[in-house]
């Protein structure tokens, strides 16, 4: 059974800090790893990673995948209060469905 | 292009009643996935459907739960004889093809089911 573990479970930082969120996984026939941001409603897509060592970047957010060590990180620099959310990591394997971790709850304070 | 539409947003049922949750995928998407989220937990896969076919229902409870995606109309997740433990947020997601290397899922805003 595919498995995704995220850490930390929750995190409180001050505005302007840089945070790193971790995601480790076990999956049969890895296809892709995805990061989503969930505020109060629908998870919204952030990144899809398929290859090791290639950083994906979008503004202050970036992510990278290590397929040898089976993990990914999501970095957020210069955090803002609007970054407060639950960040979900998910993998796709043979079963062609997303398996999610429990998420990291990030709170950014003033 | 409208996103994934789910209704109702909130549904309250008494124990023993039936709950019907609807999901209209994004235009052009023929693959639908249902997920359940309990408080402080991640999204748990329930079922994957294409038009008129159930592809993977490995995450569905064996009893009381069923899903369909007819040729015309929305996908329906049906829960019969609801119990308090069914209270959760139910999310629908769609993609234009089978989830794989190049496809990401687009999620609806979810239906919050509360069982009294």
Image (spheres, coloured by chain):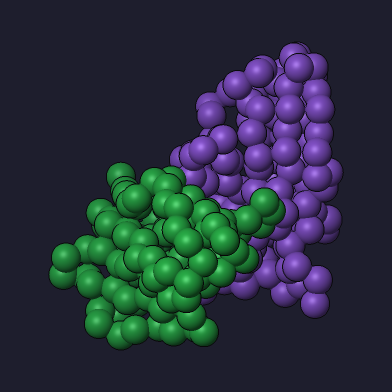
Q: Quadrant of the C terminus of chain A?
A: bottom right
Quarter where residue A85 is shown: bottom right
Left-right relation of B71 to A9: right
Residue B51 appearing in the image: yes
Can you say which quadrant of the picture contains the N terminus of chain A? Answer: top left
Image coordinates of residue B81 in percent, x first then y, are: 72, 18
In the rendering, at what x and y percent does residue A51 appear?
A: 30, 80
Q: Which chain is green?
A: A
Residue B50 in sight: no
**Residue at 52% across / 46% down in the picture?**
B43
The front one of B1 and B33 is B1
Colour of chain B as rendered? purple
In this image, A84 relative to B69: left or right? left
Residue A43 drawn above or below residue B20: below
Residue B25 in the image, given as x and y percentages of width and height: 73, 62
Q: Residue at x 62, y 66 (%)?
A: A82
Q: Viewer-proximal residue, A73 or A80?
A: A80
Looking at this view, is B31 or B39 the one in front? B39
A57 in relation to B90, above or below: below
For image coordinates 80% across by 45% down, the residue present is B9
Report which quarter residue B78 is drawn in: top right
Q: Is residue A79 above or below residue B51?
A: below
């Amino acid at each position: 059974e595919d498995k995704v573990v995220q850490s930390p479970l929750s995190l409180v930082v001050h505005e302007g800090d840089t945070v790193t969120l971790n995601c480790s996984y076990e999956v049969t026939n890895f296809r892709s790893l995805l990061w989503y941001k969930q505020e109060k409603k629908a998870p919204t897509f952030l990144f899809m990673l398929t290859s090791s060592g290639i950083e994906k970047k979008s503004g202050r957010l970036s992510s990278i995948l290590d397929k040898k060590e089976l993990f990914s990180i999501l970095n957020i620099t210069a955090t803002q209060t609007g970054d407060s959310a639950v960040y979900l990591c998910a993998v796709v394997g043979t079963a062609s469905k997303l398996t999610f971790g429990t998420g990291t709850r990030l709170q950014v304070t003033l | 292009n409208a996103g994934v539409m789910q209704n109702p947003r909130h549904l309250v049922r008494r124990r023993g009643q039936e709950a019907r949750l609807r999901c209209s995928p994004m235009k052009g998407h023929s693959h639908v996935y249902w997920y359940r989220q309990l408080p402080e937990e991640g999204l748990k896969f329930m079922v994957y459907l294409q038009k008129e076919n159930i592809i993977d229902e490995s995450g569905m409870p064996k009893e009381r739960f069923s899903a369909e995606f007819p040729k015309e109309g929305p996908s329906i997740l049906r829960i019969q004889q609801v119990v308090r433990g069914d209270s959760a947020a139910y999310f629908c997601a769609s993609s234009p093809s089978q989830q794989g290397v190049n496809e990401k899922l687009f999620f609806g805003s979810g239906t919050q089911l509360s069982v009294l």
